Image (spheres, helix red, strand yellow):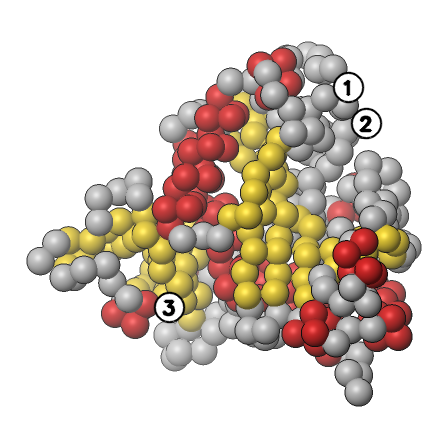
Amino acid sequence: MPKFKLEYIWLDGYMPVPNLRGKTKIAEYEKFPTLEELPEWGFDGSSTLQAEGSDSDCVLKPVAVYPDSTRRNGALVMCEVMLPNGDPHPTNSRATILDDPDAWFGFEQEYFLVEDGLPLGFPKGGYPNPQGEYYCGTGFKNVGDVARQIVEEHLEICLDAGINHEGINAEVAKGQWEFQIFGKGSKKCADQIWVARYILNRLCESYGVDVEYHCKPITGDWNGSGMHANFSTKYMRETGGEDYFKALMDAFEKNRDEHIAAYGPDNHMRLTGLHETQSIDQFSWGVADRGASIRVPHSFVKNGYKGYLEDRRPNSQGDPYAIASRILKTIAEVPTS
């Protein structure tokens, strides 16, 4: 029987942004294992801020598995962290979120590729040309050389894994890139974002490059990084209507502070009212308005206020589990009849 390399991946206890951790288990299977065939596995929680040294055992519970084309007989295993008694660990944000299999989410993950603390393409002790030609740009002066190679390789590994990428592009700032992932069900889409982040982090090791997820790593007249959340429910797609939409926007405005709290740290540095953002202390919506809190696509209005909406406030280092759950909580407040 072949031996499989199972990379168990989890989120540690660091706050406000957890780190991705991973360790490899070797196990024999006749063919690629199903999720049900994967055992739970222990780890030292005292080394990840998830336990004391005197009682350090924590448990990894597999929740999703993907092929890993970078290894022969490889698998990427996304896990929840559990306590030895079987309860979710306090740092386990996945176990307690709202989930609706009929809720569709599309996350747009922006990030910077950095070397020696600077985004790729930034000269030491200075700045490149101002923003303008980098978005979806081509040519060495706009995107460099190694960045495109990393981004393309990352895409191929993710597609091999079955992660539902919908696109990639160079972003507005120099050294900034984006990938988009769509999933049906909040947990499914969030799982894939975390695994795609893990794949990108690991890939960049071989290039001597780091991934910077901070929402505003370069101050000044440079775009920050977001993780715009496109979302819809079955009711929004099939029934909708202008009255329901306006009630939904009222609920989002009422819960503005709760959303900001769930949308990633340091967002005040990014949500300034500039660089395609609304100010953090305001709420707005607008048709095709990238400076609004919620962008309403033209197609949504033309279709009788049915379809999907884009919340532009989540930031690039936010937890997609928490973001999706907060959106669903607010939607649940709005009557559908």
Q: What residue lies at 55% left-to-right and 51% top-to-bottom?
A: 181
Position of residue 42 relative to residue 332, above or below, is: above
Q: Give the image location of residue 123, x and y in percent.
A: 64, 13
Earlier in the chain: of badge 3 and badge 1, it is 3
**Residue 247 on image: x %, y %:** 87, 74
**Residue type, numbered disc 3:** Lys
Q: Amino acid at mark 2?
A: Asp
Q: Is residue 181 above or below residue 189?
A: above
Q: Quadrant of residue 236?
A: bottom right
User: Please, what secondary structure does the residue beneath circle 2 have?
Assistant: loop
For the residues bearing labels 2 and 1, Cβ distance under 8 angstroms:
yes
**Residue 130, numbered circle:** 1
The amino acid on which the numbered mark 1 sits, given as a three-letter code, is Pro
Q: Which residue is mark 3?
A: 61
Report crowding for label 2: few under 14, some 14 to 19, many 20 or more residues within 10 A (C-alpha).
few
Give the CA distance from mark 2 to mark 1: 8 Å
Label 2 vs label 1, nearer the camera: 1
Mark nearest the camera among 3 and 1 is 1
Q: Is residue 317 left or right of residue 254?
A: left
Which residue lies at the image location 65% right of the left edge and 24% below the top edge? 137
The answer to whether residue 46 is seen in the rendering is no
Label disc, if present, on residue 221 of the rendered structure: 2
As displayed, is residue 168 above or below residue 135?
A: below
Answer with mark 3 or mark 2, whichever residue precedes in sequence. Answer: 3
